[in-house]
Image (cartoon, helix red, strand yellow):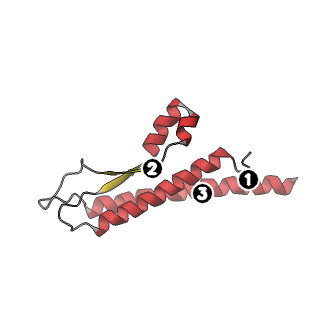
């Protein structure tokens, strides 16, 4: 049995997805002026939510997926990266990561308290 529990595994996976998303967003920003470049996004939480609706076992196999964005309008040079969108996405992602880290820290604090009490 895993002492940290499956909840911890899930939080770690969420944090990993947020880290990957941050890398993808930085890559998007670095290519803001590259003609024909299409921004990418990371899909994880959506797939996880759908899998959890079906079964816990299926949710354990969900991995983050990097996909090219074909929805955001392109500029005349074929690039669809906008600095404002990427920076807003980075801020949102940072808040998600900090929330996940806070939950994980609380979980370990609870474990430490539990161990110290025995």
Q: Residue 62: x percent and y percent?
A: 49, 43
The answer to whether residue 73 is left or right of residue 116 is left
What residue does disc 1 label? Answer: 110
The answer to whether residue 108 is left or right of residue 72 is right
Mark identifier at residue 67: none
Mark 2 element type? loop
Residue sitting farthest toward the front? 61
Q: Which residue is at 36% across, 61% downward?
A: 25
Q: Which residue is at 35% across, 59% downward?
A: 88
Crowdedness near tag 1: few (<14), some (14–19) or many (≥20) residues, C-alpha within 10 Å? few
Crowdedness near tag 2: few (<14), some (14–19) or many (≥20) residues, C-alpha within 10 Å? some
- Is residue 96 visible in the rendered image? The answer is no
- Is residue 97 visible in the rendered image? The answer is yes
Q: Which residue is at 37% across, 57% downward?
A: 89
Q: Quick one: quadrant of the N terminus?
A: top right
Q: Earlier in the sequence, mark 2 or mark 1?
A: 2
Q: CA distance from mark 3 to mark 1?
A: 12 Å
Q: Residue 33: x percent and y percent?
A: 21, 68
Mark identifier at residue 64: 2
Q: Which is in the foreground here, disc 2 or disc 1?
A: 2
Q: CA distance from mark 2 to mark 1?
A: 28 Å
What residue does disc 3 label? Answer: 102
The answer to whether residue 11 is left or right of residue 79 is right
Q: CA distance from mark 2 to mark 3?
A: 21 Å
Q: Quadrant of residue 36?
A: bottom left
């Amino acid at each position: 049995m895993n002492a940290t529990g499956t909840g911890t595994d899930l939080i770690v996976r969420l944090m990993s997805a947020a880290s990957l998303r941050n890398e993808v967003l930085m890559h998007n920003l670095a290519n803001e002026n590259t003609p024909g470049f299409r921004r990418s996004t990371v899909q994880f939480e959506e797939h996880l939510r759908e899998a959890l609706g079906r079964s816990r076992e299926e949710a354990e196999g969900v991995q983050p997926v990097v996909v090219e964005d074909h929805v955001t309008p392109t500029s005349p040079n074929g690039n669809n990266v906008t600095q404002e969108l990427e920076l807003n996405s980075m801020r949102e992602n940072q808040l998600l990561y900090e929330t996940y880290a806070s939950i994980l820290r609380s979980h370990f604090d609870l474990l430490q308290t539990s161990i110290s009490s025995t």
